[in-house]
Amino acid sequence: MYKRNYICLSACILWVITAVQPAVLAQHAHDNASTDTVNLAVGDESKRKSPSFFHRPSKDSSAAQLGFANKLLSDGKQKAAMKQFSALVHKWHTSPEAPAAQLAYARILYDRKDYTRAFDEFQYLVDNFAGQFPYEEALDKQFRVANYLMTARRMKFLFIPGFRIQEQALPLFEKIVKNGPNWKSSVEAQFNIGVINEELGNHDEAIKAYDLLRYHYPDSERSVDASFRKAYCLYLAANANMRDETQCRLALSALAGFAGDYPKHGSYELAVKYRDELDARLANMNYERAVFYDKSGKIKAAIIAYEDYIRKFPLSKLAGNASARIEILKGKLEKNK
């Protein structure tokens, strides 16, 4: 009997362990991820790395720990070294060795092609160890990661192209510009913010990005490219609202301005093509308004609309028809007096 009770008790204990362990491990995994992969605002000390059970150093001091981690790395034990560098930062965050350990940790993640985590760990350097690491290298690595995500594809199957994951690169480029607004590649990062928004169909956000580029980097070559991209976004918006005269005028003005200012640019011919297309559309809208008043019997309004059309589009094919119609309508007015 005692034997049977003992077996039942053992089974119950085993069941409890089996049921609880996955939850505990899941929580541990979550804690581990939350402390290693960080995404901090500048100066947010409350989220900085701190000592934990899962980041225990092997040595008793930060200096000894750094030497130990470097030795592991030089011996080709990259993964083990990575853990020890991370442990140092968690245990001795304010030590002189912490920035070097954090930099080494980020570098290893980058070398292992764990790009998104690498970006975040370089960002951790920017947010917590300003002036204590090679800033140029950190920005360069972040820029490379963002570019990779911008051009990578989510999946490929045989000869079918995959889906781009550029939306993941968008906040990364935004951080790069914020980290180093005067850095050599920040203008390219800002331009890519506009391109990604444009490709995602966020034309208003793309226009804002291009305007910011032109404002902050007016002398860069990308400033001219941004002028065309902005005009093109306005053109797309005008096509999405075919009867919106205001939107059409905005796009027409931007395209005409670009074509007038940059006749040697590679996008000049496209700008002229889109300009002429919108000009014809706007002319038709104006002529149709005059015809509407004409057919509605609103003689004075029709005359004003036809005259307005001729003034705005004197070289159009319908300008002659508008002039003839004005004479006829004015004759009707004379008869009605």
Image: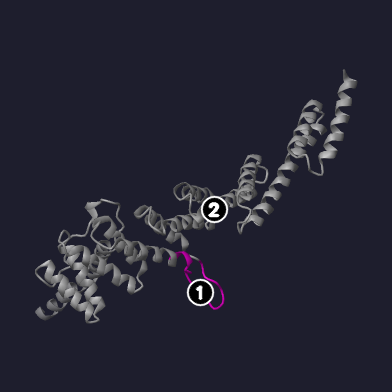
Q: Position of residue 206 (x, y in %)?
A: 51, 51
Name the amino acid, label 1.
Lys
Task: Classify 10 Å Cα crowding around label 1: few (below 14), some (14-19), many (20 and above).
Answer: few
Report which residue position mark 2 lands on.
Answer: 224
Q: Give the range drawn in magenta.
A: 149-163
Q: Is residue 101 magenta?
A: no
Q: Does the magenta stretch include residue 157?
A: yes
Residue that sits furthest to the top in the current view: 337
Q: Foreground residue, 314 or 249?
A: 314
Task: Quadrant for the N terminus, please.
Answer: bottom left
Q: Is residue 16 visible?
A: no
Report which residue position mark 1 lands on.
Answer: 156
Question: In the rendered view, does 143 fall on the left or right side of 325?
Answer: left
Task: Classify 10 Å Cα crowding around label 2: few (below 14), some (14-19), many (20 and above).
Answer: some
Total count of labels: 2
SS class of the residue under badge 1? loop
Question: In the rendered view, does 213 fall on the left or right side of 136?
Answer: right
Of mark 1 and mark 2, the one earlier in the sequence is 1
Q: Where is residue 167 in the image (x, y as percent from the top left)?
A: 46, 59
Q: Do the residues labelled 1 and 2 touch (CB within 8 Å)?
A: no
> Residue 164 bears which disc, if any?
none
Check the image and report above or below for 117 versus 43. below
Q: Report how far apart the C-alphas of labels 1 and 2 lie in the structure.
A: 35 Å
Question: Which image quadrant is residue 86 in?
Answer: bottom left
Q: Where is residue 53 in the image (x, y as percent from the top left)?
A: 16, 66
Name the amino acid, label 2.
Val
